Amino acid sequence: MKLSDPNGASFSYTLTDSILKRLHEIDGKAKGYLGIHDAIASNETRNRYVVSALIEEAITSSQLEGAATTRKVAVEKLRTGRKPVDKHEQMILNNFMAMRQIHALANEPLSLSLILHLHRILTEDTLDDPDDAGRIQTAKEARIKVVHEAQNLVLHVPPAARLLPKRLEQLIDFAERARKDKASFIHPILQAVILHFMLGFEHPFVDGNGRVARSILLVGAEIWL
């Protein structure tokens, strides 16, 4: 199944030598975990590494969205369980909570309910209207455009909101077919990247589109690797 824009133009990608090299490196490093030293592979040590990785991912994703806090303060907040004092800290906590669920979510088929569930977690107490959490935009709402604020330039106008239910259904169908179809192989990382790109293209939410797209990318990587 092909993915396309609202006018019917199909999306495509090109596998350059540098991309193939990076995919090979990822494959090699992923297999390397099977031979990890017993001390590092112990439950206690492994859990410490996992928590550290989750914290780093949560902070980085939030900073990409404009969260203004230092890494030191963010790490302290997550490790101690201190309640967020502002929207920026709440965003980081939400990202951390979403990251913790990704491994479990990888066992479930991708669905609209899963995407909305992630959006609800990622945007809790960070939206101007709390009712916007866990729902896509409706046809009655103005679409959220992607704008380069410094240059006052519109970079992307998403498809009409009335098309979102069907287009998201097609994207989910593509993801599930790509995962199960053994005759037409797409590398797992490329599948995850395609999901990330398409969610950004559809831009289905009032806010939090980037955070959801990055989380779905990680869910995709967990599913297929």
Image: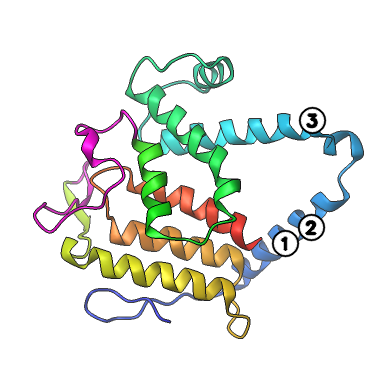
Front residue (pair 58, 163):
163
Q: Position of residue 63 (x, y in %)?
A: 42, 33
Front residue (pair 158, 182):
182
- For this view, does 213 lie left or right of residue 77? left
The residue that label 3 is drawn on is 45
| Residue 157 higher or lower than 61, as above or below | below
Amino acid type indicated by mark 3: Thr
Q: Secondary structure at mark 2?
A: helix
Amino acid type indicated by mark 2: Lys
Q: Position of residue 111 (x, y in %)?
A: 42, 60
State whether the magenta stretch is mostly helix, strand or loop. Answer: loop
| Residue 51 higher or lower than 37, as above or below | above
Q: Secondary structure at mark 3?
A: helix
Front residue (pair 91, 9):
91
Q: CA distance from mark 1 to mark 2?
A: 6 Å
Look at the numbered discs 1 and 2 and tell me whether their residues touch, using CB distance below 8 Å.
Answer: yes
Of pointers 3 and 2, the one earlier in the residue sequence:
2
Mark linked to residue 97: none
- Is residue 68 visible from the viewing direction of this image? no
Q: Quadrant of residue 66?
A: top left
Mark linked to residue 27: 1
* Quadrant into which the C terminus falls: bottom right
Whether residue 141 is in magenta: the answer is: yes
The residue that label 2 is drawn on is 31
Residue in the image at 29% along x and 40% along y:
133
Q: CA distance from mark 3 to mark 2?
A: 19 Å
- Segment colored magenta: 124-151
Q: CA distance from mark 1 to mark 3?
A: 23 Å
> What crowding class fits label 3: few (fewer than 14 Cα within 10 Å), some (14-19), or many (20 or more)?
few
